[in-house]
Amino acid sequence: MKYQQQIDGILEAVGGKDNVISASHCFTRLRLQFRDYDIVDDAKVRAVKGVVGLNKQGKEYQIIIGTEVGNLYPEFIEAANVRAQEQVQVKEAEAKEKLFDKIIGIVVGTFVPLIGLIAAGGTIKGVLSLLVQLKMMSNESSTYLVLFAAANAIFYFFPVFIGFTAGKKFGATPYLSALIGAILIYPTLIEAATAGNPGHLFAIPLTYLNYSNTVLPAIFAAWLVSILEKFFKKTLPHVLQMVFVPFFVIILAVPIVLLVVGPLVTLLSNVLSAGLEWIFNFSPILTGIIFGGLWSVIILFGLAWVVVPILINYTIQYGYDPIYGMLAPAALGMAGAVLAVALRSKNSELKALGYSTGLTAILGVTEPAMYGIAIPSRKTFVTASIGTAIAGGVVGMMGVKIFAPGLSGIFNVFAYFGGDNLSQNVFWGISTLVIAFVAAFVLTYFFGGWSDEDFESKLAGE
């Protein structure tokens, strides 16, 4: 196997394959859970060749490898003899997650599988806007209507998708929680909401709401489904469960969601969106500088998924987001910083590391650059953040909007296509990516680079 040596090193460092109980991966991280966390040696894991860094989130042990993790993962599963996300008993002391870690775990598990869909839908809509702007396609043509429907369906039917992923994360049958999401956007209910006529459900006054293009109601509905389903699975005889568990869940969940959960969570969603607008309108330039400058710090401390759901919620509601544009240049800022380190270095290893991680950062994967150079160097991390802060300020000043959150690095170019002022938004959007890269590169080259001596002493210390 291609990754045999690296996998053997990881397994030895984490206490052997018998200690690994589940494994999954995202774009850059191998995510593991263990039977006994006390025997895991962090230092040995970091020392394994090809491991960029570590992060811990509740019970999840995240080994940062980079974009190669997708190729390593199948071999790791085979070597460790585990199945992805296999659920078995873990050591009790480690199983008690902090509430914050548990919430973050739910958020990540709910939204990460859908990021690609959101990005794809926004990108298709952006490209269509560009083609219409260039007079290459009519917005009344059948081709436009079909492609726009394909893209917009992702946002319109988002309660179904989010119901599925949230239900899976809460431990419910995902098809059942997705069904509740589908009920929220059933055409007859949407028509009643559009007409604005109140109704009654079991003699209780009911206000019809349009739940299409929403995020939070389906998440809370999925949570309710998980509670009800677990209750009836414990209560009903096994022979009756196949039919009557979903029967009772639907009969109880739908009224509760439509009468209580939906309206309250919609209010919460509107408050979050209003809060986001207030933050932006208070001082767009200052907001851009703060968000842009601190985004890498937020990622470093694992808090990105506190912010991302709020941004996604806004985008699903309104079709664009003003804050995400302030964060988008971060990958280019990191790329500019580490490439400056590589360019001025005379150490062949540091040059190779800088060029390789700089390229992956340009393509949107920043963790190798962050953990391989920026964080150990510290000054490079600061200059990269300053470059992004400058770009974020320009985003705020020019009112740049993002129409396809979920893209990263240079691919954010496609996220700027949309809106009434398409040419201006695209010009300044791309300009901010360039500004972040150039500012971080110049600052790092002259003030914040990682010296060859510091790099060599780090290697010697390892």
Image (cartoon, rainbow, N blue to C red):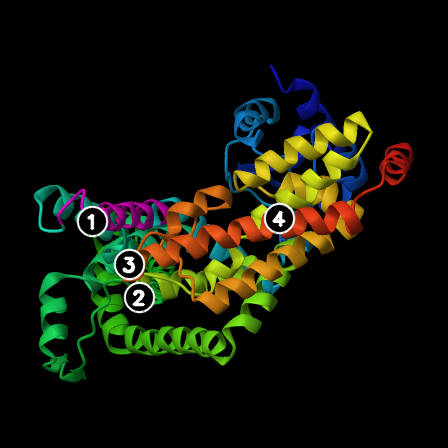
Q: Which residue is mark 1?
A: 132
- Local SS, label 1: helix
Which stretch appears magenta?
A: 119-138
Q: Is residue 135 magenta?
A: yes
**In the image, which is nearer the foreground, mark 1 or mark 3?**
1
Residue type pointed to by label 4: Val
Q: Quadrant of the N terminus?
A: top right
Q: Identify which residue, 404 or 126, lies in the foreground.
A: 126
Q: Secondary structure at mark 2?
A: helix
- Which residue does the image show at 82% across and 30% down from the upper left? 346
Is label 2 or label 4 in front?
A: 4
Residue 150 seen anywhere in this rendered image of the structure: yes
- Name the residue: 8% across, 44% down: 142
Q: How far is disc 2 from disc 4 in space, using C-alphas?
A: 32 Å
The amino acid type of the residue labelled 2 equals: Tyr
Q: Where is residue 10 shown, x and y percent of the image? A: 70, 30
Q: Do tag 4 and tag 3 residues touch (Cβ < 8 Å)?
A: no
Badge 3 is on which residue?
159
Label 2 sits on residue = 318
Give the answer, above or below, for where 437 lies relative to 260.
above
Labels 1 and 3: the sequence-earlier one: 1
Residue for point 63% across, 62% down: 294
Q: CA distance from mark 4 to mark 1?
A: 32 Å
Say what amino acid the circle numbered 3 marks.
Answer: Pro
First in residue order: circle 2 vs circle 4: 2
Indicate the quadrant containing the C terminus: top left, top right, bottom left or bottom right: top right
Q: Which residue is mark 4?
A: 438
